[in-house]
């Protein structure tokens, strides 16, 4: 059981510490979601442990013969509803949909990620900095924990905290954030993927020189 004064970790560490594929995958996730360079792996292990518990509960309920009534029905509804409130499942989701959730989905629901996705920061790293320094709030509540999981109800009240100078749209950091995101959006839509005249002419020439169906029949075979 352990000593009550010293809480046991609520996540599982990798069974093998030196697997190259897993290490490269976790480093990529750390860069993608702007996790700490030292200690960022722990955030990934926490997300994987949560995901593992949800999948185990879903598989246990899927293996039951009948979960349409009684205790197992309530347990199934509670699990699906819980993940729906966390923003990990959509309307009308089932137990099978829980098995499709990935660690990326879990990490994207963190406060740090949502601050970036909602345009309050120009990068994941800056989003973490704004959260830690007390510039982000949920309503009147100041939030300083980047790993806090945002629920669907929290999404509508996520903004700059009212005591933060960033509430002023003319603040230099706000202006820089808006300009950086505007430049990124312009760069995404600046690419023209419409076919050129040379491409169309090449396709037409290839069609004219292509053999007919009768020319491709193998002698002695069926057409």
Image: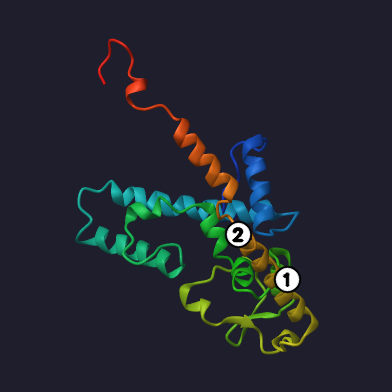
Q: Position of residue 92 (x, y in %)?
A: 31, 64
* SS for callout 2: loop
The residue positioned 69% from the left and 60% from the top of the image is 34
Q: Position of residue 159 (x, y in %)?
A: 61, 81
Residue at mark 1: 180
Measured Cα–Cα span from mark 1 to mark 2: 43 Å
The tag earlier along the polypeptide, 1 or 2, is 2
34 left or right, relative to 90: right
In this view, the residue in front, 10 or 77, is 77
Foreground disc of the pair 1, 2: 1
Residue at mark 2: 7
Q: Is residue 151 above or below residue 164?
A: above
In this view, the residue in front, 22 or 186, is 186
Q: Position of residue 154 (x, y in %)?
A: 51, 77
Q: Position of residue 176 (x, y in %)?
A: 77, 76
Q: Is residue 222 above or below residue 46?
A: above
- Other residues around mark 2 within 10 Å, as few (<14) / some (14–19) / many (≥20): few
- Other residues around mark 1 within 10 Å, as few (<14) / some (14–19) / many (≥20): some
């Amino acid at each position: 059981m352990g000593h009550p004064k010293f809480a046991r970790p609520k996540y599982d560490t990798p069974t093998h510490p030196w697997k190259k594929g897993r290490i490269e995958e976790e480093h990529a996730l750390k860069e993608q979601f702007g996790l700490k360079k030292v200690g960022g792996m722990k955030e990934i292990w926490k997300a994987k442990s949560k995901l593992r518990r949800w999948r185990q509960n879903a598989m246990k309920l899927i293996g039951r013969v009948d979960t349409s009534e009684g205790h197992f029905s309530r347990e199934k509804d509670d699990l699906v509803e819980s993940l729906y409130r966390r923003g990990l499942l959509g309307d009308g989701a089932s137990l099978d949909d829980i098995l499709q959730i990935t660690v990326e989905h879990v990490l994207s629901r963190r406060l740090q990620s949502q601050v970036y996705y909602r345009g309050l920061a120009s990068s994941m790293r800056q989003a973490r900095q704004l959260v830690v320094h007390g510039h982000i709030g949920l309503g009147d509540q100041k939030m300083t924990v980047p790993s806090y999981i945002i629920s669907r109800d929290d999404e509508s009240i996520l903004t700059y905290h009212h005591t933060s100078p960033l509430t002023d749209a003319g603040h230099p950091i706000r202006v820089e954030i808006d300009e950086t995101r505007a430049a990124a959006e312009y760069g995404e839509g600046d690419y023209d993927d419409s076919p050129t005249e040379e491409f169309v002419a090449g396709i037409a020439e290839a069609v004219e020189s292509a053999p007919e169906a009768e020319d491709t029949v193998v002698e002695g075979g069926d057409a």
